[in-house]
Amino acid sequence: MATVSTTDVFQKNLFAGRVLLCSGGGSGICRGMTEAMVRHGAKAVIVSRTLSKLEKAAKEMREATGGDVFPVAADVRKPEQVEQAVAKAIEKFGRIDYLINGAAGNFLAPFENLSYNAFRTVIEIDLLGTFNLTKATLEHLKASKGAIINVSATLHYKGMPFVQHAGAAKAAIDALTKHWAVELGPYGIRVNGIAPGPIAATEGIKRVVGENMTQESIPVQRTGEIEDIAQSTVFLFSQGASYITGVTLTVDGGEWLTSYPPGYPTSVLKPTHSKL
């Protein structure tokens, strides 16, 4: 059963006059989150390291939505680049109302094959990148009484093998979501998370599960779609969620309540060796 579009559920001008900044917004789940916000009236700034890929994604999203998407290259691990990206967003649109922390890295590797550098790199992209971008946008989010969504995962809910680096980073991000909800709430800023489960046609599924994913052990009997995450994004940023903060919303069809994802290589694995 396919999901309906966000435009069938939410008002099309829901975020008119508002501005979204999204790291990782040029591809995958975060691109879908960004496009959903633009379809509902928001202007968007997408951030990642490679400008050419961002420009292509921004052009495609503008053509698909008729909205305004502005690409800015920055490495979220580097505070000075993040601050420059935020400055460019403000120069372009004058404000930031919503922040999605979505930049992430992941691959399969058992503990004994996981290098020091590879572990550190994932922590830097996921965890430090989330901190850096939030720190750089904070004063603007205070001014707009904005909202934040931290993109998490369900990896650490079960202690899944071969993804401890990403699981550790996402567990820490879930903690930041709670801490920031408490600290930033008095400024009118809401902070929530979204933990996607197995979402079809994404790079994460290709890397972690490959082509073996089936639907039998997912309680709702289907794999997720990027639109499922988009729906949750629009809701959490909307006034309908104005009394919700500090929550990480699991969007996985109940999969985390079962065993490992269908097709997950828990017994025989040829690990992906990081070259980082």
Image (cartoon, rainbow, N blue to C red):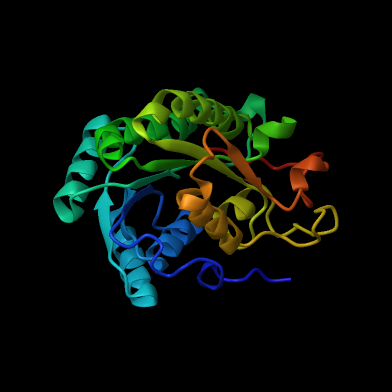
Q: Position of residue 158 (x, y in %)?
A: 74, 32
**Residue placed most toward the observer, 179 or 243:** 243
Residue shown at 31% from the left, 40% from the top: 75
Q: Position of residue 141 (x, y in %)?
A: 30, 39
Residue furthest right in the image: 216
Residue shown at 46% from the left, 54% from the top: 30
User: Left or right: 128 with respect to 269?
Assistant: left
Q: Position of residue 222 (x, y in %)?
A: 76, 62
Residue shown at 68% from the left, 71% from the top: 2
User: Relative to 97, is 224 above or below?
Assistant: below
User: Left or right: 39 with respect to 17?
Assistant: right
- Residue 160 visible in the snapshot: no
Q: Quadrant of the C terminus?
A: top left
Residue 157 lies in what quarter of the image? Answer: top right
Residue shown at 83% from the left, 43% from the top: 258
User: Relative to 5, is 242 above or below?
Assistant: above
Q: Quadrant of the N terminus?
A: bottom right
Residue 25 lies in what quarter of the image? Answer: bottom left
User: Relative to 225, is 166 above or below?
Assistant: above
- Residue 274 visible in the snapshot: yes
Q: Position of residue 91 (x, y in %)?
A: 14, 50
Looking at the rendered structure, the number of numbered marks drawn on it comes to 0
User: Left or right: 2 with respect to 169?
Assistant: right
**Residue placed most toward the observer, 149 or 49:** 149
**Residue placed most toward the observer, 202 or 45:** 45
User: Left or right: 17 with respect to 39?
Assistant: left
